[in-house]
Image: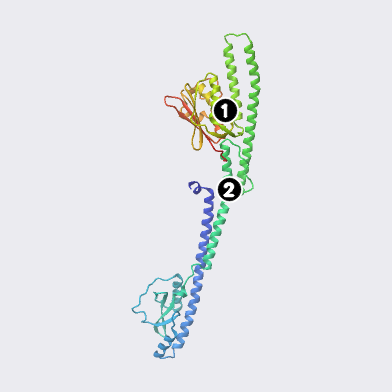
Amino acid sequence: MRKLTGSLFLRLAMLVLISVVAAQLFTWWIVTGERREMVAKALYTHVIDTLADIEGHLDPMTPAARQTYLSTYNRPGMMQILPGDADRSLVFTTSLSPLAQAFSEQLGRGLGVRSVVKTRQLETSRQLWISVRLLGAPYWLVIPQSHFHENQLSRATLATLLASLTSIMVAFTIAWRVSKPISQVVDAARTLEHGRTPGPVPENSGPREVRALTESFNRMTRSLQTAASERRLMLAGLSHDLRTPLTRLKLLVEMQEANGDTPDMLDDIDELSRIVRQFIDFARSEEVPHRAPVALAELASSVVSRFNREAMEIKLTPLAEPEIPADALALERLLSNLLENARRYGRAPFEVTVSETSQDAVLSVTDHGDGIPMERRTAALAPFERLAEHRGTDGGSGLGLAIVERIVKQHNGTLQLKDVDGGGLKVVIRLPRAELTS
């Protein structure tokens, strides 16, 4: 709900909606007011003509004949003329409908005197009582309230409701058309943030400024893809070209007569080979992963066994055997880099744990070295960041954790660096057990 209330879509929709509805309400107020005035004038004309006609008939009559005439004239449910004392002992209210109020004001202006206006509630209807004078004598003009009934669903009201509903649909359509391409750019940016290549955002929708934004974003994405591709080719080509002379150099050193410098020279060559291999892994980590079902516990067992054969004692604890959609080679590089970092910068005992939750498979690697200070953990995940002052100077490339983080992002996972009781570092990686589409 918070995401919706703060969205551009809702704000645009509300802006258009409020503007149009306010205009419709103002128009409705003007139209109903004009209609009320027209009805009041028409009723006033009818009443004046009726009073003039009655007064013309009463003028030549005697008082008794007038009373007889009015008794005959007054009929239930119609307009009546009652004597001035007919309101005695009757209960009245002063509340008037807008139309009745407009009529009474029009009548007062037409007659030139301020009339007393009251309403009387009967069992099934209401009456409007207005004081008038006929031939100099006071009378009450009694009009049934049905003459002043204002239809709440008049044509003006129905037209306003229809226009408002149309405005709501138009407002949400306009807001959706404006905000949709921006949302597509945001989704593509999030995909790019997670290390994946987004598809091109459609450039033919939205206003001119939004189309310019999508075009610029697509150009930026293509430029990044080109730069990343060139970087991968450069790293892969350079690394491949270096491996051949390094292999030849190692072979020459091994074939020469052994001396005191031979072990150090071989160690340096192996170190260079490891750095070259990390460059290749870093270049490969930018490639789109080829996902297939992977048994994480079996993969971890295979990698741990290889390191155990290299005289690195690692305890593997498979608490679960989750299967996840992943690139098996990428996960092997991930775990290999974590174990290599643990061997170089940590201390035994080393432990690899595989577990699972309802949504994720969890892989953790623990060592008991000096760990990484909290303030340096973000930097530790950056490429070529070696943290030499904290983790020793050994000629590493500073790509191990950067490769790990990139692979984790490509698999929509999360990476956490935690402290270990008694000293050390625990790297916890969570990978979704179900394929994500975002």
Instruction: Specify the quadrant that holds the C terminus.
Output: top right
Q: Quadrant of residue 226?
A: top right
Left or right: where does residue 18 sit relative to residue 291? Answer: left
Instruction: Indicate left or right for 429 with 257 as reference.
Output: left
Of residues 163 and 354, the one nearer the viewer is 354
Mark 2 residue element: helix
Q: Give residue 169's quadrant in the image.
A: bottom right
Q: CA distance from mark 2 to mark 1?
A: 40 Å
Q: Position of residue 428 (x, y in %)?
A: 49, 31
Circle 2: residue type = Lys
Residue, disc 1:
332
Relative to 367, does residue 94 appear above or below in the rendering? below
- Residue 398 shows in the view: no
Q: Position of residue 330 (x, y in %)?
A: 58, 30
Give neighbour class at mark 1: few <14, some 14-19, many 20+ (Cα, 10 Å): some
The residue at the point 58 percent across, 43 percent down is 185
Q: Which residue is mark 2?
A: 180
Q: Amino acid at mark 1?
A: Glu
Q: Earlier in the sequence, mark 2 or mark 1?
A: 2
Q: Residue at x 62, y 46 (%)?
A: 211
Is residue 292 something that shows in the picture? yes
> Mark 1 falls on what kind of element?
helix
| Mark 2: few/some/many CA within 10 Å (<14, 14-19, 20+) | some
> Residue 100's spot in the image, x, y percent?
44, 73
